[in-house]
Amino acid sequence: MSKSSEHTAHPVIELAVRLHNEALLPSAEAVEAAGSLRSLAATIMDRRGRAPRRYTPHQACMRHPVELLLDTLSEVKPYPEGVVPFSARLPGTAFFPGGAGLWGAQGDRPLPIMPIGGVMILGHDFHSEAAFAKTLVSGGEVHLSRAGPNYRRVPTWEALLDVLDELEIAPARCFFTNVYMGLREGSGTTGRFPGSRDVAFVERCRRFLLKQLDAQRPKLVLTLGAWVPPFLAPLAPQLADWLGVRTLREIDRRGPVRHRVRFDGSVFSCSVVALTHTCLRGPNVGRRRYGDLEGHAAEIAMIREAIVASGVDARVV
């Protein structure tokens, strides 16, 4: 194979990437077709010895979904008291909007492909202004090799990756993001997000979340912590009874796993699971209940059920 033909894209790969990287799919059937094309394209590329998740043809005329989201992030402004915008973007692996929200992101390389039809990991908010400044020094929230000399132990990521490993969910098939945009002003990192008291700002963040959902069209959404489920409740009738809940114990009574969830204006449906926030999973997961199961086993059962019901393919490709 000549050097020039070695980098020529297969037509199927071109089409799969276009369907995945451009939010132009008009129907649920088209979304399913895109998933099939992704698998076929990945197979072709694997046989040719290249990793599919970094394939970005025609970058000059095709923009990445994350870049498009960042372009419209200004729609959540103005930021309310106690919330400040990001001063920069983390080049490495980090939750959106502090980073790209994609596993394996590196500042000097093209962004990994958005995992269309994969898993959305949905947190509450990114972090505080002070903590973000410290994270900028290392370039990302977590290093890809957990055994490497530069690995930083970040509680949210450490526990989250353990759960994903146990369920054989590849981080590369996940989009890591948050419901609230902006940073907590100062150094405080816990408790209710300051912007959650501003009704107009909350609504703008909900509208922006719908854009994120449309960009990824996940088959499975895993929420982190007790604050996220009530935020989602007004966006889908299947989640309506989560409105006003304040604890995961109450969510367990109402049902922490929902299937065939269709968010406002969406052409796709997904399963949604309410999980303990991984930054405090150790002391809190023991309170979870699902059927006859308790604690860690209960949450794992929730996710396994949702994987089967949603049909998500979250394996490494």
Image (cartoon, grey):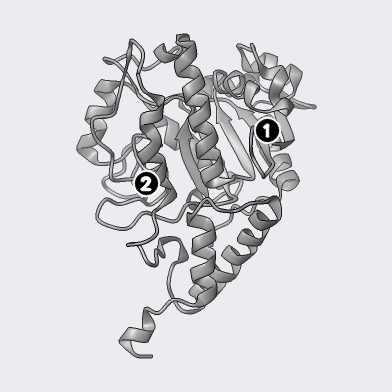
**Mark 2 surroundings: few (<14), some (14-19) or many (≥20) residues within 10 A:** few
269 left or right of 87? right
Rendered image quadrant of residue 180: top left
3D distance between C-alphas at marks 1 and 2: 38 Å
87 left or right of 128? left
Q: Residue at x 48, y 31 (%)?
A: 208
Residue 296 visible within the image: no
| First of labels 1, 2 by sequence position | 2
Number of the label disc, if any, that sits on residue 297: 1
**Residue that lies at the very extreme toward the left in this rendered image:** 137
101 left or right of 150? right
Q: Residue at x 63, y 26 (%)?
A: 235
Q: Amino acid at mark 1?
A: Ala
The correct choice, above or below, for 158 with respect to 315 in the image is: above
Q: Amino acid at mark 2?
A: Glu
Q: Identify residue for label 2.
A: 67
Rendered image quadrant of residue 236: top right
